[in-house]
Amino acid sequence: MAQTALARERLFALRETIARLEGKSAPALAAAEREALSEGRERRQGRIMPRLPFGVEQFDDALEGGLQLDAITEFRAASSCDAGAASGLAMAIAARLQKQEEETSRLLPLLWIGDVVGTLEAGRPYAPGLRDFGLKPERFFHAAPRKLEDALWLAEAAIESAAFSAVVFEVRGNPLHFGLTESRRLSLRARAVQRPLFLLRQAGEEEASSAAFRLHVEPAPSDLRPLPDGSKLSGSIGNPIFRLTLEKSRNPAPLSFLLEWNPHEREFLPVNEPSFARPPGEQSTHSVAQLSASANGPYRPQAMGAVLAFERAS
């Protein structure tokens, strides 16, 4: 299987070289890749890999049953301020994967490969926080290579070893040395050993890749913490809520969902769109009245621009 994957990788590299000589764009290369992989998919129909469902019917239907466990899934945060939400989603999915493995008595560790610059911006995983989020710290390994080339080598070696239930590969932005070719190489190894790779992209733009799914992740306002009697604790902060936009899938248009993560049950819950929530990509702003005129000043008050609406901030 590994030899077949390597042979296919060389074939893709040749096709990419030819496509570049012919002046084809990156999306065209991705389309050529899907066409070349169609025969391999047909041969694998008899041994379909189980998927990791979110447990939310509408969202799982959009994912055709859940995340593929032998492919790349990308979690993209468009800006640095959303990096925590993307990391939180990756941890939640890893925790859900650990729960699924516990039900089958298969206990493998998780490897998180951190980006040096990304760590400076968003921090690194914290063991007590992992436990509170639903992960098992004793089954969590963290690596922080100094160079992207070392991180890529480690990701490929970790996937190919099949020693981890999943590998989380953290990348900052859209680095030059991590493009479609490197993504395809990781995808081939994931398919060969039937292990998932979660690509966590901080402050990055959309780009062509071999990811089966790409989710744009944003934080959403949390509800109040529920009490045993059914009421809610005033002034408290409940479970984290993510706004997920399915950017890459078989669906013809992006789909957006709000999901709540319950770390105790390690389950996702659907959330209805609140009246104060904003559409994806829209800035949360609020127009206010002009300031009153100064008592001793001869000038009229100037119009005040839009300011952040604190009641709508997450």
Image (tube, rainbow, N blue to C red):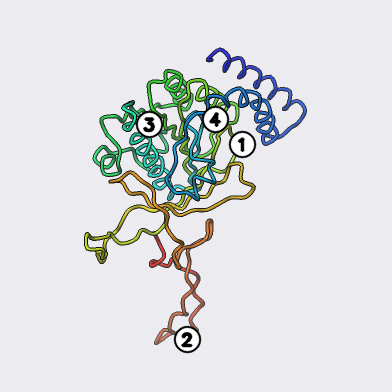
Image disc number at residue 298: 2
Q: CA distance from mark 3 to mark 4?
A: 17 Å
Which SS class for mark 3?
strand
Label 1 vs 2, first from the N-terminus: 1
Q: Nearer the viewer, residue 36 or 276?
A: 36
Q: Which residue is mark 4?
A: 178
Residue closest to the far right: 22
- Going by the numbered disc 4, the residue's amino acid type is Phe
Label 3 vs 4, first from the N-terminus: 3
Left or right: 107 in relation to 194: left
**Closer mark to the observer between disc 3 and disc 4:** 3
Left or right: 65 in relation to 133: right
Q: Nearer the viewer, residue 188 or 206?
A: 188
- Residue at image x 32%, y 33%? 103
Q: Nearer the viewer, residue 282 or 172?
A: 282
Q: Is mark 2 in CB contact (under 8 Å) with mark 3?
A: no
- Residue at image x 44%, y 32%? 169
Image disc number at residue 54: none
Which SS class for mark 1?
loop
Q: CA distance from mark 2 to mark 4?
A: 59 Å
Residue 182: name its quadrant: top right
Residue 22 lies, with reference to residue 271, above or below; the image says: above
Q: CA distance from mark 1 to mark 3?
A: 23 Å
**Closer mark to the observer between disc 2 and disc 4:** 4
**Closer mark to the observer between disc 2 and disc 3:** 3
Label 1 vs 3, first from the N-terminus: 3
- Residue at image x 46%, y 30%? 196
- Residue at image x 34%, y 61%? 223
Q: Is mark 1 in CB contact (under 8 Å) with mark 3?
A: no
**Closer mark to the observer between disc 4 and disc 1:** 1
Q: Is mark 3 in CB contact (under 8 Å) with mark 4?
A: no
Q: Which residue is mark 1?
A: 208
